[in-house]
Image: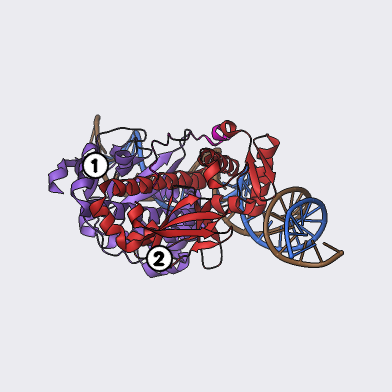
Chain colours: A purple, B red, C brown, D blue
Amino acid sequence: MEGFKKGELITDRGTTIVAQASHGPHFYTVLSGMAFRYKLLEDGRRQILNYLFPGDLMGLQSALLDEMQHSVEALTPMKLCIFEKEKIGELYRKHAGLAYDITWIAAQEERILDEHLLSVGRRSAIERAAYLLAFLSMRAKSLRRQAGINGALPITQTHVADTLGLSIVHTNKTLRKLQQRGMVRWLERGCEILDETGLQELAGWEASPAGRRPFI
Amino acid sequence: MEGFKKGELITDRGTTIVAQASHGPHFYTVLSGMAFRYKLLEDGRRQILNYLFPGDLMGLQSALLDEMQHSVEALTPMKLCIFEKEKIGELYRKHAGLAYDITWIAAQEERILDEHLLSVGRRSAIERAAYLLAFLSMRAKSLRRQAGINGALPITQTHVADTLGLSIVHTNKTLRKLQQRGMVRWLERGCEILDETGLQELAGWEASPAGRRPFI
DNA sequence: CGCGGTTTTGAGAATCCTCAAAACCAGTGG
DNA sequence: CCACTGGTTTTGAGGATTCTCAAAACCGCG
């Protein structure tokens, strides 16, 4: 993989790394830090689609299809590994193992999106919140060090609202209930998960065994 | 690709082709017909994730990851091309072009799921309905013949409800409004799209240019 | 004709939203 | 050191959307 690496990108929290409708020549993998990707409606309504952790691919869509149809914003300082879109054909020809890993990661992403869609479409507000926090807790768990997370998830209630498809006000009231049950604790700009198992049960969700995740 | 084909599968409408948590040894591509994939919560709430048309892959997740986490059900009689999960490694080693196409299709699927998530999370009921019908109309358009669709989409209002994350009752009232505007027409077990452009505008959605779709 | 699946309608209730404003906190500049 | 500012969390109140329950109408099919 080293042969295809073009460089590294360091960004701060709040930076927009790739933007909707852009045609940049690169795609990336996350080396460290955490981010989220989202889409906007014309009138500003925002839907967060998923969160990115170390090992995740960023911008594969723009590499294979023509352009990017979502944006990505950093939640922490990040370090990214840069690749050139043009070289992806060569990669598939010369390194079947890496090609397989890329597809593997894409399939994993699809599975997560399925899960989110189920949640937003069919779970109640409190179930959705429980699911999301359990999900993030699970993903962050093994990657705390690399993701640059001390103890709390670096998100705000606005992020939660835009992920769950709820208003900020109702999100706040819902999270408050989870806090009363002792499952989470909110800090300024952060969320501490206290009872991951409890959240999973409340959501009616079992994390699927991750399997071996290739780290590109 | 012929070398990897193991056979064909013919199914009727209503057949469950692959089931949640199954570990079958195969995956498929759709040769003709139309289907949908969905997830269930324990208490029976159902979320439809996406629809399958000729050219789409079915069960890639179970080929790369361990098991299937959603089910697929046929909406029309179907013809599927069967592949063996075990051979996928070999395919990646020997046929980079096909491997690339598989990833391309997976990326396309991811993009569609992003779109759906935006819709379910942030659009109003009528916008969601308009988006879904415009989307299905668009996908069916070039594939009417192969998908085995005469004129109307072979879905019920229950399918629409479970795709949009709404109740059947409210879905019915919403579709009724679209009908009053002359954009669609409902038959028994089917939906005829009369004004695709109008639906797109109402939803605030522009279909992305499909690009060249590989047909495996 | 009767049956199951689908569409339609009405009514009351629950969830969730918008508007508005206050409280809180970290960081900034004076 | 303190006041100010912008972002975030919190709360209340009324209203809109969407849900559940219930039942009727409709349709193709055996």
Q: Quick one: which residue is furthest to the left in this view? A: A3
Position of B66 relative to B115 (above/below): below
Q: Earlier in the sequence, mark 2 or mark 1?
A: 1
Q: Secondary structure at mark 2?
A: loop
Amino acid type at image mark 1? Gly
Q: Residue at x 55, y 41 (%)?
A: B144
Q: What secondary structure predominates along the stretch shown in magenta?
A: loop
Q: Mark 1 sits on what residue?
A: A89
Q: Does residue A24 appear left or right of residue B23 in this picture?
A: left
Q: Please tell me how many numbered marks the rendered image carries.
A: 2
In this orientation, does residue A185 appear? no
Instruction: Look at the image and say whether residue B200 sits in the magenta stretch.
Output: yes
Residue B20 relative to residue B160: left or right: left
Specify whether residue B60 is in view: yes
Q: Position of residue C18 (x, y in %)?
A: 55, 40
User: What residue is disc 2 on?
Assistant: A183
Along the line of sight, which residue is nearer the eye, A116 or A146?
A116
Q: Residue at x 57, y 59 (%)?
A: B12
Q: Chain for mark 1?
A: A
**Percent x, y for residue A192?**
33, 60
Vertical relation: B99 (above or below) A18: below
The answer to whether the residues at label 2 and label 1 have Cβ atoms under 8 Å apart is no
- At 13% from the left and 47% from the top, the residue drawn is A2
Amino acid, disc 2: Met
**For the magenta stretch, what is the residue range?**
B199-216
